[in-house]
Amino acid sequence: MNINAKIALGIDITENKVNLALLKKSKTGIKLVKAVSIALAPGVIVDGRVEDHLALAKTIKTAKSTNKIKTRASSVSLCAEPSLLQILELPKAAPVNVRKYVQDEIKQYAVLPLKNIEMDYCASGSNQFTNLKQILMCAAKIDEMVLSVRKFEKEHLNVRRIEPAILGYLRACYKNIAAPAKNKNLLLVMIRDSILTLCVFRNNNIEFLRTRKLENLHSYLEQEIHSVLQYYDLEVQNIEQSWQITLFTNGDEIDDETADKLKDGLSSENLVLHISGQQDLCGEIEIKDNTGYISPVAVGLAMKILEPDSAGHSLNLLPKEILAYHKAKGELLLIANVAAVILLIIFLKLGLLTSKSLEIDEAVAQTKQISIEDDMRSLLESQKTIKGQIEKTQLSLDAMEHSGKPEVFVSWAKVLAELGSNIPKNVQIQNISVENSNSMELEGIAVSYKAVNAFAKLLNECKSIDSVLLTGSNMDINNSGLVDYSITCEITK
């Protein structure tokens, strides 16, 4: 159970340093409160993999404590190998189960193992030349990152997202880099350690994406850029706009001399080379207090936590076991709060009974002159009153204790079996949640509103379902062309 955070920490991890960006959201917008960059000891990150999880967690803890950063909600850049970041084109006949289609495609890449990988995808937009919808997909062997996240949790960090660095940069610099290039072809070149990422951004869509590991990066950088430009010149039609090439590094991968040579080698009337940095951060991000290097990647990672429903490309490779742990932790916190309220009510009731007892004692003391027989009668009546109040209070507590417990056993195996046999091919269930003992909510995607309504009618005909309510159906916010839906079902008692 994640409540939208007001303060978030973006953590950008590279082989030689960790960059932190602390953002705060208010009514006036998002403010960059602090930016910190701290060096990593050699051997902590090797070839894109975390080798020393404890040292990485301790480094982040030191940076937080030294700079008095207390926030827990955080997002981390993907630091795992092998990994895959790719654009996939869907066939004309859109698959019913998009996730399974993506998983099957991932198996075709030899770079990834067949097991123990995490993946996520989002819509990348429609290709105007082939009319095929595109999907931005990321997959990685995440075992090492899981160990790191567990170490982070012990250092009081609540990691909510693991996201590729390129998306963090695009999110933080979109209004100053991508939006102004509306009438141009934008080629974003990102250099992180020895990993080169080439991304073509056209018509507000990521149209081309390539990642390569180059040992001698400076020698091949210009050649890699030219290969993308030549591909578009030869293979893609109607390319009339000029090119803007934006180069972003962590600050130490490329020197001034190399940058100048690159500018000379790429000089053209229809080509502009821009060396990007923290000056390209969105203008709406106010820098409140900063003395160090500002990582646009870390800023973009934190922005997604503060605005989880914002439009744009979004991927999250946080493993399901970590998500389940966070959910269980939230439910435990909710149960603890309810228990605290119940205990408070019990103490108030006991206090009331104690007060009543004191009042009765005073009344008895004032009537000592009355005969023993009258004394006994009055005492018995008082005890009867107290006993009745105690019994009434006990009944109230028993009712509170047993509230919310199911009165009727529901055969969920039978319900789920019947549900599985009635799922159409053009509808996908992504989440099933049980609201109470006889109610469940289904969430998922469908190819059309008509498919959603047909699915609801099929559910209504199930013997194990008493009633069906379509609580929501909207077009997917990622512009995938699919329809998000939510259906509440009352289970037959």
Image (spheres, helix red, strand yellow):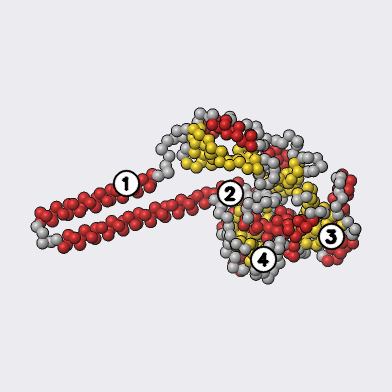
* Res. 323 mark: 2
**Secondary structure of the residue carrying numbered label 3:** strand
Task: Tell me the amino acid under the disc marked 2.
Answer: Leu
Residue 425 at what x, y percent from top left? 65, 32
> Which of labels 4 and 1 is toward the front?
4
| Callout 4 touching callout 1 (CB < 8 Å) | no
**Secondary structure of the residue carrying numbered label 4:** strand
> Which of labels 2 and 1 is toward the front?
1
How far apart marks 2 and 3 lie (CA) works out to 41 Å
- Please, is residue 303 above or below residue 126 in the view? below
**Secondary structure of the residue carrying numbered label 1:** helix
Q: Which residue is mark 4?
A: 286
Q: Residue at x 67, y 69 (%)?
A: 290
Q: Which residue is mark 3?
A: 273
Q: Residue at x 52, y 37 (%)?
A: 489
* Res. 369 mark: none
